[in-house]
Image (cartoon, rainbow, N blue to C red):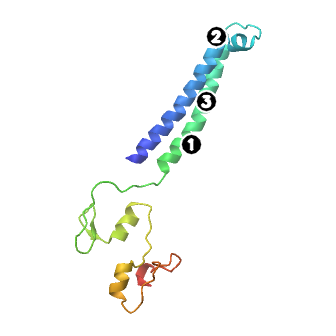
Amino acid sequence: MQLILVRRRMLLLQAGGFLVLIAVLWMNEVLDLPHRLFGAAATPVNWVEGLIESALVLACAALVTAPSHRLLRCLRLRLLQGILPVCANCHRIRDERGRWERIESYVRDHSEAEFSHGICPDCMRVLYPEIPASPQGPDPASPTIGPGGC
């Protein structure tokens, strides 16, 4: 849902920018801005020139917005939203089909996130009481446990 709003906002901003450009072109054509602002020689309104310039701006708008629209439509940004049913004991998540799966699998399959495992200081004290706790906390450069517990 959020990606759709981002796509709409981006396309509206692009379209708005091109519409402002067309408005400035027509203001220049009708009000003869160089004559009024800089004292240049006055020129008559040229409707054909204004229409051709507007068509060129619209063609540029199509060339810019079409790839942006395709890119945003194809973007594989997936967001987890709403309430996720999580088991209070094993912390597995119930998916849309009613199956319970590990939180790592669920998040990996429903988003672009990946998991890396480590051991928090509290679990380290419980699981490995023989290893003294580091006074500064865990070393950020220490290796983490990968998939499969290795």
For the point 57% across and 28% down, which residue is it? 18
Front residue of this view, candidates 97 and 138: 138
For the point 49% across and 51% down, which residue is it? 75
Verify CB contact (< 8 Å) between mark 3 and mark 1.
no
- Residue holding disc 1: 67
Kind of residue indicated by mark 2 = Leu
Residue 96 circle label:
none
Residue 60 rendering spot, x and y as whole percentages:
62, 32
Q: Measure the C-alpha gap from mark 3 to mark 1.
A: 13 Å
- Residue holding disc 3: 59
Residue 105 rendering spot, x and y as whole percentages:
36, 69
Residue 72 rendering spot, x and y as whole percentages:
49, 46
- Residue holding disc 2: 31
Looking at the image, is mark 2 or mark 3 nearer the viewer?
A: 2
Label 3 sits on a secondary structure element that is helix
Question: Does 132 sit left or right of 82 as displayed?
Answer: right
Kind of residue indicated by mark 1 = Pro
Looking at the image, is mark 1 or mark 2 nearer the viewer?
A: 2
Q: Residues within 10 Å of mark 1 (few under 14, many from 20)?
A: few
Q: Earlier in the sequence, mark 3 or mark 1?
A: 3
Kind of residue indicated by mark 3 = Ala
Q: Is residue 122 above or below residue 54?
A: below
For the point 28% across and 63% down, which residue is it? 95
Q: Earlier in the sequence, mark 2 or mark 3?
A: 2
Q: Residues within 10 Å of mark 3 (few under 14, many from 20)?
A: few
Label 1 sits on a secondary structure element that is helix
Quadrant position of residue 39: top right
Q: Is residue 142 above or below residue 25?
A: below
Label 2 sits on a secondary structure element that is helix
Q: Measure the C-alpha gap from mark 2 to mark 3.
A: 24 Å
